[in-house]
Image (spheres, rainbow, N blue to C red):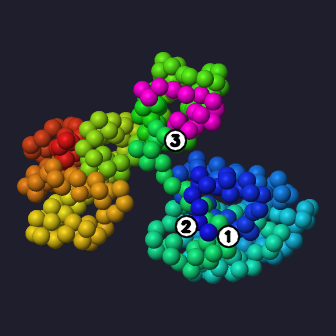
Amino acid sequence: MQIKAEQLRAHLAKGRLARLYVVAGDEALLAIEAQDAIRAAARSLGYSERAVLHADARFDWSLLLQAARCGSLFSERRIVELRLPSGKPGKDGGAALQQHAAETAQDTLTLVSLPRLDRAARDSNWARALDASGVWVDVAVVERAAMLDWIVARLESQRQSAPRAALEFIAERVQGNLLAAHQELAKLGLLHEPGPLSFDQVKDSVLDVARYDVFALSQAMLEADRRLLVRTVEGLRAEGEALALALWVVSDTLRSLLRLKQDTSSGRPFAVAAREARIWGARLAACERALGRVSAGSLAELLERCARLDRLSKGLAPGLGDSDPWLELADIAMEAVPA
């Protein structure tokens, strides 16, 4: 059975736990909170002993089966935690997980933590076996558009509120870093009494804890968000990110748009062209909107500028464009999809 992370507390409140739980997702804070909630519910029902296994590339998968079969030394019930940070158990691990899912004893609760799996891994026999034998908790990433609602909910949980300008200030500062957002909101809870917070109170408390993700450049380009583009480029530069990686992200976005533009101009349906270009999810709609704002000629010219920028970054003749490679990168990205 699959549930969303926000449904987990209601599930646990029923007081009847499954034999096996999988917590899968890349949002560290929410995954940690989901695991903590499962542990707390298990402890309240007498699962007082705990064994933790870290499955790296050299992990002996027989240890998982031994942990499930051996009885508890000090209590009637025990928790077996398996942490699989790669999300790839391999052939032996996959077989062990299938066997474990089928043989888990009633007095043992298994908690498996995974990153978000791609479609092929999610459809694997071992993943299906885990899903069928327990509860799969899907921890979704909090997208930028949903960040304000998430902040509001967190403030409400500590009986506080803030004006929209303050909420937007927090969201802008943390830039998708949920752990940092959690820390800043918890700090507001410690510094101020329950009730409405002013913008000045929030501004004085919240630090600039943005986590700049180089791959966020692509989505910012597609959405023509110039403010976010500039902040991200400046942040990446300040954090010492390699220019070559940022340039690759920008160039790859331009190539994808150019290919889509050429395909759709020749009469191919957008959905078909996007599928062949391996574009899906939030990028799908953003790419379709971006195509209406660009021409094939302008995209080709920007790719030529990327090639010149690549030579500039390697110390060769700069040619046309800004002599500062990071400023040139920001200019290319902003001209790619004009608002």
Report the side of 283 relative to 207 (left or right).
left
Q: CA distance from mark 3 to mark 2?
A: 27 Å
Q: Are marks 1 and 3 in contact (CB under 8 Å)?
A: no
172 relative to 14, above or below: above
Picture disc at residue 144: none
Give the residues in magenta: 151-165
Q: Secondary structure at mark 2?
A: loop
Q: Is residue 161 magenta?
A: yes
Residue 153 visible from this viewpoint:
yes
The x, y position of residue 177, in whole percent, is 49, 42
What residue is disc 2 on? Answer: 87
Identity of the amino acid at label 1? Gly
Which residue is nearer to you in this view: 215 or 190?
Answer: 190
Identity of the amino acid at label 3? Trp
Image quarter (top left, top right, bottom left or bottom right) of the C terminus: top left
Which residue is nearer to you in this view: 318 or 160?
Answer: 160
Say which residue appears at 34% left-offset and 63% top-offset: 280
The x, y position of residue 295, in whole percent, is 10, 54
Foreground: disc 2 or disc 1: 1
Looking at the rendering, which quadrant does residue 227 occupy? Answer: top left
Tag 2: Cα neighbours inside 10 Å, few (<14), some, or many (≥20)? Answer: some
Picture disc at residue 150: 3
Report the side of 333 relative to 87 (left or right).
left
Identity of the amino acid at label 2? Gly
Which residue is nearer to you in this view: 227 or 132?
Answer: 132
The x, y position of residue 3, in whole percent, is 59, 61
Picture disc at residue 134: 1
1 relative to 245, above or below: below
